[in-house]
Each structure stands twice: as structure tokens, then as C-alpha cells.
Image (cartoon, helix red, strand yellow):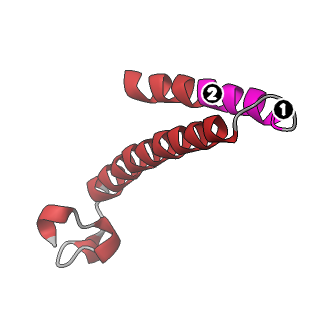
């Protein structure tokens, strides 16, 4: 369970750096630095959402829903099942 905590720390650090950069945009911050930080934050969030999606799908797949015995809904199918 360490990955989500580490991911949150990385995200929080990135948000702090972005806040610092955006506060200096009209003075000394390089817009390229802001763009790099935004790209970094976007990558961190995407990784986090993929992780969370896998956890949610796993939990839903573990449910005993009688209607899903014959055919699971598309949103629960893994890449291997498609």
C-alpha cells in the first residue's frame, strides 16, 4: 500500500512547485518551467488514476452479482478478456 502514499507525496510536491512557479510568472518564472511542472503533474495524476481504476475494477470483479456470471459488463472486463 506504499505506492499511493508515495504518489500523493509526489503529487503534493509537484503542486507546491507549480504554485511557487505560478506565483512568479509575472516576474521571474520561466514559462517553460511551468509547462514542465504541469506535464509532470499530468503524468503523476494519470498514473494514479490508472492505479485507482485497477483497484476499483478488482473490487467490482470480486462482487458476487448473479447477472454477471454469464457475462460481465464491458466496464469490468480486463484487457485479456476483450
Q: Earlier in the sequence, mark 2 or mark 1?
A: 2
Q: Residue 22 occupies which quadrant of the picture? A: top right
- Secondary element under disc 1, as helix, strand or loop, is helix
Examine the rendered structure and indicate whether residue 69 appears above or below residue 18.
Answer: below
Q: Left or right: where does residue 12 sit relative to residue 44? A: right
**Residue 78 painted magenta:** no
Identify the magenta region: 12-25
Alpha carbon distance from label 2 to label 1: 16 Å
Q: Residue 20 occupies which quadrant of the picture? A: top right
On the image, the x and y values in percent for residue 15 come to 67, 32
Q: Give the residue displayed 34% in from the left and 56% down from the top.
A: 57
Q: Residue 4 occupies which quadrant of the picture? A: top left
On the image, the x and y values in percent for residue 55 come to 36, 46
- Please tell me whether mark 2 or mark 1 is closer to you in this view: 1
Quarter of the image that includes the C terminus: bottom left
- Secondary element under disc 2, as helix, strand or loop, is helix
On the image, the x and y values in percent for residue 14 come to 60, 29
Magenta stretch prevailing secondary structure: helix
Q: Give the residue displayed 30% in from the left and 51% down from the top.
A: 58
Give the numbered dot on residue 23: 1
Give the numbered dot on residue 12: 2
Amino acid at each position: 500500500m506504499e505506492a499511493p502514499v508515495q504518489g500523493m507525496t509526489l503529487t503534493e510536491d509537484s503542486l507546491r512547485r507549480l504554485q511557487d512557479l505560478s506565483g512568479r510568472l509575472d516576474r521571474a518564472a520561466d514559462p517553460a518551467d511551468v509547462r514542465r511542472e504541469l506535464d509532470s503533474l499530468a503524468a503523476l495524476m494519470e498514473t494514479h488514476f490508472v492505479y485507482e481504476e485497477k483497484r476499483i475494477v478488482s473490487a467490482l470483479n470480486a462482487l458476487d452479482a448473479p447477472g454477471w456470471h454469464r457475462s460481465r459488463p464491458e466496464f469490468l472486463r480486463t484487457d485479456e478478456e476483450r
